[in-house]
Image (spheres, grey):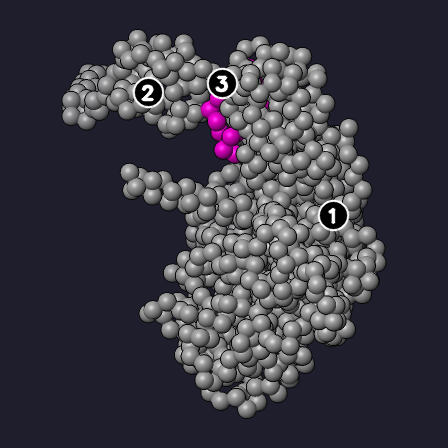
Amino acid sequence: MTMAILCIAGVGLVAAVVLAIADRYLSVREDPRIGMVTAALPGANCGGCGFPGCDGYARALVAGTAPNGACAAGGEACAAEIAKILGVAAVATERRVALVKCCGTRSEAIRVGDYNGICDCNVAAATAGGDKGCTYGCLGYGACANVCPKGAISIRDGLAKVDKRLCIGCGKCVTACPKKIIELVPASATIHVLCANPDKGPQVRKVCGVGCMGCHLCEKNSGGKEANHFTFQGFLAKVNYENPPTDEQIVAKCPAKCMSVDPHFESGH
Amino acid sequence: MKTVKSSFKFKGGVHPDYNKELARDKAIERMPVPAELVVSMSQHLGAPAKCVVKAGDFVTRGQLIGEKNGFISVCVRAPADGKVKAVEKRLGPAGGKADAVILDTTAKPEGESDERRETGDGSSHVSRPSSPILPPLDWKTASREDLLKRVEEAGICGMGGAGFPTNVKLNPPPGKRCEYLVLNGAECEPYLTADYRVMLERADRIRVGVEIMRKVLGGPAVRIAIEANKPEAIAAMEKAFADIDGNVEIVVLPVLYPQGSEKHQIFATVGRVVPEPPALPIDVGCVVENVGTVAAIADAVEKGEPLLERVTTVSGDAVAEPKNVLAPSGTKYSDLIAFCGGEKVPPAKLISGGTMMGFAVSTPEIATTKTTSGLLLLSPKRVFQYSSQACINCGRCVRACPMNLNAAEIAKAVEADDVKAAEDAHVMTCIECGACSFSCPAYRPITQFCRRAKNSIRARIAAEKAKAAAAAGK
Amino acid sequence: MKPKDTAEHFILSSSPHAHAKSSVSRIMLDVMIALLPATAAGVWFFGMPAVWTIATCVSTCVVTEALCRLAMKRDNTIGDLSAVLTGLLLALNLPAGLPLWMAVVGSVFAIGVAKQAFGGLGMNPFNPALAARAFMLISFTGPMTTWLKPFWWRTPEAATTATPLATMKTWFVSEATASATPHAAPAFPGLWDMAIGNIPGCIGEVSAIALAIGAAYLLWRKVITWHIPVMFIATVFVYSLVAGGAPATAQVLTGGVMIGACFMATDYVTSPTTAKGKLVFGFGCGLLCMLIRQFGSYPEGCSFAILIMNAVCPLINRWTQPRPFGAK
């Protein structure tokens, strides 16, 4: 009996000594603030800040090589907390969300072939240039939906749509889209032009029933050129997000029906 | 000069239905110049040519309309007289868009007489000037540099499909010597018979081309590779090369797809193995050139005729009259199909090239280029659908792969978005021949998975290079 | 309003645009055709119980797969015939007199647990029929080791018996302890009986000749390659020559080696993809089979050997990657 007690006690003593030595000589000294900042960050590890995961951003913040406020997912609340921990003021940033600039569903835009292959927009675009009549438009095979860390993008009737409530503005979908038609826009903007085809009106009409024809009516109805709410690329209207229009009437007046008020499913933040 | 059988057989390969009997006995037929030509600036591998004409300009046949843009680039010349209607982006057979000169061949400058336009072989709109476009050269006395310059000016690129600038290929970098010139007469793709007809009907041009290339490359040995299912072509080449001097052999290859692949040609004829990319055939002392390209070189030097037209096999079970058509580059597929009697039945697939490596296209408004060896119209009976079934690990793709890759593993890795695993499985060595997808009983698009991985890896390498360049620039 | 689309529509896919005439269901059908001689032999020797077992296993497997796919909200895959094949293979690996409810339980395990739980065809790490057989051996050891004699209905009072394997097991033991010669060993079936299948055993494993005919068919149809069967059988043969005990031919012709080597170990999903890997796999199966027979307490070595090699298969695949053309 005594032998057993002595043995166990001996093992315990040896283990304690080993652990003490390890703690003394093998421990990694880390700035405790890194842990605090990591806890303040949302933990999505989406990479939207440009750093490898929340831990990577935390280390960069503590080392002073990253600006506070780069975390789109955490937003202002998170930036404020980090400011408290590190004493670094937050750089004011507005929340941005992704917008797929196309409204050509399978019911509205023609397809010029039957695509048979891997369900991915990049390979579909590489196969004969894609099966959509409009070579600028969304193919709807889900490259953006696959990379979205929040599952904010869904494909309906061959068209990708972003749910504004879930989008954290990390920008992964922007990189994934082979047509480059996803743009990060201010979350506060409500009026959008959902088209990316700069071709002349009759050309657009041949391939899509809801493509922008460049008629300039949206510009006229929102105060004309001087109001500077729209810019034009070829025959494509583009909302000027630094000075966006606010009159929702112009959406109803668009003859192509390619404009939308807050197309992210439900409005509201 | 002797004919030998190949003593090397590569592992893998498949035996697709060849269906060459549809067009193999049809002599090359020249089609009349169509009313409109769509001449792309990107008919070759490398930087697209820079367009030097604009809408409204009149051009003559052979006139330079696109300057070569960089070292790996090829110039483009007008395949016929006409007026430039527009210069705009058009869809190419591989799916990309490139600038193209839209040429109206029926238009002529004011005051020009019609007489000039009636000369030639009976077809109107073709002006055949009595003087050649470029001054003819005597290859025996011309210098190596002059010959190379002529190949460059004539806008010749590899006509087998890849379109690599021929003047660059014939000019190995210092330190690399060409020991073997291999003529690629394998034509292993199903349905295609263009190279076969060129070997039968233009063997003498090929002979001249070989002499010219031998001179330019510094006297290498010559190996003419032809598959065993083309005995008439072998006979024709034997006749044309009977009295040639030097180390020249015709090598008869076993019928196996992809025997026409560059690396496998080299292995089958001289037994050398080209190392994995970025190594090239010249690194093992070999230059491989398609027989069509060789004939084009002969015409460019001796007749001063640039590369303006080529033989395209129009075949398939949905076209009324399969033919081997000699058409100017820039001919729309719809014109080719009309020349071949139109559609017999509505085709389910339109393919530019052969069935194994060709491109499925969405519209017959796409035009031919210098590398369009075939146009296939396949009826619904001859097409199949890829599926999203899981891999059953049967190993047929692994056995079929001529590059000895584990195609099943690569496909599974790409499906799971693990591009790194695909890279470790040597996916960059893949030649995209399609033997894997051909053999897969689960109808998996393995070749497409490989392409996806390769595109991802190339994009990543390009991004890293750009980042490094930006950092270095700072 | 959608513009009118009158142009011809073509199929747009990546190359290649040609395909060999092969499909998963055709391969499964080929294997079932190859198993017809062995099935016929089993029914011939064991009568109606064999028929009932086969019918039960096949139908239960198909129904289980359909229900599993429904529950998993995935597409219905019974059309690829892999469930039918698993049912047939499982039945051929069971004794004829097994109570049918046990066959049902085994079939549900084979498809539900060993196959669909991993994701379906192509995802399973273990051969489903063998995994089920192992499960049943452990759960219902008695009935699973009670075999009907061939033509049992002629002597219904002595219908069941041990297999030659059990007899051979005693040979190993007696070699070590006594000086008994093989000729003094307990009654053992003759070579002809073992070849044709006139021995007790599982429904499909008894007739070596029927199985060999089936294997030849599969080799001709290029469904299997020679590597695994030849290596497996050769290893068993050589091992028993070297180790002594029962004659090597007996070791090969009984105990499920023939069906294991030709039909179970060659299952695509659970065996290596390269020729080198297949050789290693076949050798491993043969070696393990004999080791279990000699040193293990079950008279059965084949199923466990194959299952263990199935587990090692991914490692074998990793070690036997083909060398790319042009790689150093």
Task: Determine if the magenta segment contains residue A230.
Answer: no
Indicate the secondary structure of the residue bearing disc 2. Answer: loop
| Picture residue at 40% right of the left edge, 19% below the top | A71
Quadrant location of residue B316? bottom right
| Picture residue at 31% right of the left edge, 39% below the top | B471
Q: Quadrant of the C terminus of chain B?
A: top left
Left of B74 or right of it: where is B388? right
Q: Amino acid at mark 3?
A: Glu
Residue B424 in view, yes or no: yes
Indicate the secondary structure of the residue bearing disc 3. Answer: loop
CA–CA distance between discs 2 and 1? 52 Å
Q: Bin the neighbour count of mark 1 within 10 Å (Cα to Cα): few under 14, some 14-19, many 20 and up.
A: many
Q: Which residue in the protein does label 3 denote?
A: A242
Indicate the secondary structure of the residue bearing disc 1. Answer: strand
| First in sequence: mark 3 vs mark 2 | 2
The mark found on residue A248 in the picture is none
Q: Amino acid at mark 2?
A: Pro
In this picture, which residue range is highlighted in magenta?
A162-176
Of residues B15 and C68, the one nearer the viewer is B15
Q: Which residue in the protein does label 1 denote?
A: C10
